[in-house]
Amino acid sequence: MQKTSVSTNSSLEMMIRQQIIERGITDARVIEAIRATPRELFFPRDGRAAAYSDRPSPIGHGQMISQPYMVALMTARLEVQPNHRVLEIGTGSGYQTAILSKLAGEVYSIERLKPLLDSAWERLMDLAARNVHFRHSDGTLGWKEAAPFDRILITAGAPTLPDALLLEQLKDGGIAVLPVGPQEGQILVKVTRHGDVLETTDLCACRFVKLIGQNGWADKQD
């Protein structure tokens, strides 16, 4: 069992108050899910001092863990309910996955980088998150066998809105949250599906790593 120090508890509560609540995120279920998820466990051991800092941090393989506020904002705008099935594209460290697992009925998480996926799986299993399903795959293709989903969360920046993916794998009335645009200037958007229409709402400017895949950005290593 993981032990949590008094200083860690203090840092967590300060993070929640200053970085999340004071910036307008007041959803009680989201806040409690963040409180119940030990963020420092999702960092490399030599980087855990930055776990509660107000910034994104590297987790290896050119990837980042989002700042606490961005995780809270995306989760709150997704409006996840206990009966929902959620598709997460971009497992990364597994931190966002862990929070979703506390809010949703089932979470389906896809990661293209196998070392990240393996580490995330171990963390989630240690935290007894048994409602999470993992896949090593191109996230831009979604998870057709498990579709449709009530919610879709994409944690990497798509060059354009992935209309085909959302129309094929998001339920009618479902919500997706994702960053869209070039790496130097993305917009976080909320998408609600109404039949064959995708209604988009801009949330804020942001900057995420690129969404690499067949229907995203090309991998520069290809």
Image: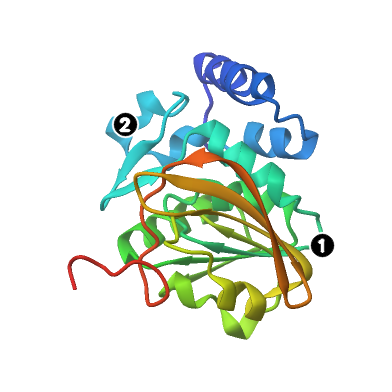
* Residue 151 screen position, x and y as percent: 69, 62
User: Which residue is at the front of the view, 199 or 18?
Assistant: 199
* Residue 1 screen position, x and y as percent: 54, 39
- State the residue lying farthest toward the bottom: 145
Which element carries disc 1, helix, strand or loop? loop
Instruction: Determine whether, in the image, residue 148 is placed left or right of residue 92.
Output: right
Q: Label 1 is placed on what type of residue?
A: Asn
Q: Which residue is painted at 53% across and 75% down in the image?
A: 142
Q: Earlier in the sequence, mark 2 or mark 1?
A: 2
Q: Label 2 is placed on what type of residue?
A: Gly
User: Which residue is at the front of the view, 45 or 83?
Assistant: 83
What is the number of the mark on residue 83? 1
- State the residue lying farthest toward the left: 221
* Residue 64 screen position, x and y as percent: 37, 44
Q: Which residue is painted at 33% across and 64% down in the image?
A: 113
Q: Can residue 56 be spotted in the picture? A: yes
Which element carries disc 2, helix, strand or loop? helix
Quarter holding residue 47: top left
Residue ID for mark 2: 47
Q: Which residue is painted at 63% across and 36% down in the image?
A: 34
User: Which residue is at the front of the view, 189 or 139?
Assistant: 189
* Residue 81 screen position, x and y as percent: 80, 54
